[in-house]
């Protein structure tokens, strides 16, 4: 089992990062091989909607997303961890998600080259927001849930927590355990 972790926060050592580390530790405990990608350290431009990928399955933008596409295809599960910025996911995570376009054909079905690898892939999501109500980050969950529903990905229940200061989540044992359990569950065959 291969589990890919995708960090959507630019704050290394911040709350989303700590929770993603917990989830990946949980997956590792189950015997998974894990890898973490920090989107802010990658060059990922926005989708151009040029539709070239509908035929080729390959994005025309020659940046770091091409390598990430390959890693997503090979992974059994992809866990995303992202803070809420102005009631939405961060720009780093949105640029990444929009570039999933390359996995689809012109009818928004999995591209024939990728369908066997993408159907039923396991998706995890962790959201963090400064607001005391963790559901303030529901717009992020909505975006991932709809994406998974229309394409037949298997979204695991999201871990949603509140934290503001950098690393504040370290004191929240319940949140850390939830993230760890997400990692364990997603890596359970
Ligand atoms: C540009 C920006 C916008 C933010 N917008 C929101 C928001 O709309 N709602 C909210 O509850 N928190 C908001 N926050 C707070 C972050 O979600 C919060 O500090 C979170 O813990 C950051 O996670 P991180 O440590 O993983 O980067 C915002 C923070 C920044 C920097």
Image (cartoon, grey):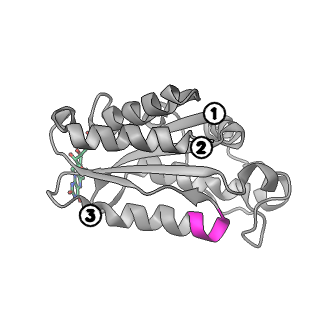
How many angstroms separate mark 1 from mark 3 (CA)?
29 Å
Q: Picture coordinates of residue 15 (x, y %)? A: 27, 38
Write the start and end of the magenta stretch as one range.
148-152
- Res 119 quadrant in image: bottom right
Circles 1, 2 touching at the beta carbon (< 8 Å): yes
Circle number at residue 135? 3
What residue is drawn where x is 50% and y is 44%?
185
Quarter placement of the C terminus: top right
Residue 77: mark in rendering: 2
Neighbours of disc 3 within 10 Å: few (<14), some (14-19), many (20+): some
Q: Secondary structure at mark 1?
A: strand
Q: Is residue 128 left or right of residue 184?
A: left
Residue at image coords 37%, 32%: 22
Please say whether residue 149 is one of the residues in the magenta stretch: yes
Spatial separation of the CA atoms under disc 2 and disc 3: 24 Å
SS class, disc 2? strand
- Residue 34, label in figure: none
Mark number displayed over residue 2: 1
Q: Quadrant of residue 66?
A: top right
Instruction: Check the image and report above or below for 150 versus 96.
Output: below
- In this view, 187 is above or below 116: above
Residue at left 49%, top 49%?
A: 124
Tell me which label, 2 or 3, sits earlier in the chain: 2
Residue for point 68% across, 56% down: 120
Q: Earlier in the sequence, mark 1 or mark 3?
A: 1
């Amino acid at each position: 089992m291969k589990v890919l972790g995708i960090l959507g926060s630019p704050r290394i050592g911040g709350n989303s990062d700590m929770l993603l580390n917990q989830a990946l530790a949980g997956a590792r405990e189950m015997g998974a091989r894990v890898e973490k990608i920090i989107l802010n350290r990658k060059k990922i431009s926005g989708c151009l909607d040029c539709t070239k990928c509908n035929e080729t399955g390959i994005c025309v933008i020659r940046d770091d997303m091409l390598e990430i596409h390959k890693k997503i295809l090979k992974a059994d599960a992809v866990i995303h961890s992202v803070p809420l910025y102005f009631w939405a996911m961060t720009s780093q995570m949105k640029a990444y998600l929009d570039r999933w376009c390359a996995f689809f054909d012109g009818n928004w079905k999995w591209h024939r080259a990728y369908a066997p690898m993408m159907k039923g892939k396991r998706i995890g999501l962790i959201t963090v927001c400064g607001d005391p109500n963790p559901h303030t980050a529901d717009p992020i969950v909505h975006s991932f849930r709809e994406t998974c529903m229309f394409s037949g990905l298997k979204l695991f229940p999201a871990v949603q927590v509140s934290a503001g200061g950098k690393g504040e989540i370290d004191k929240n044992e319940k949140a850390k355990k939830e993230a760890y359990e997400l990692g364990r569950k997603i890596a359970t065959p």
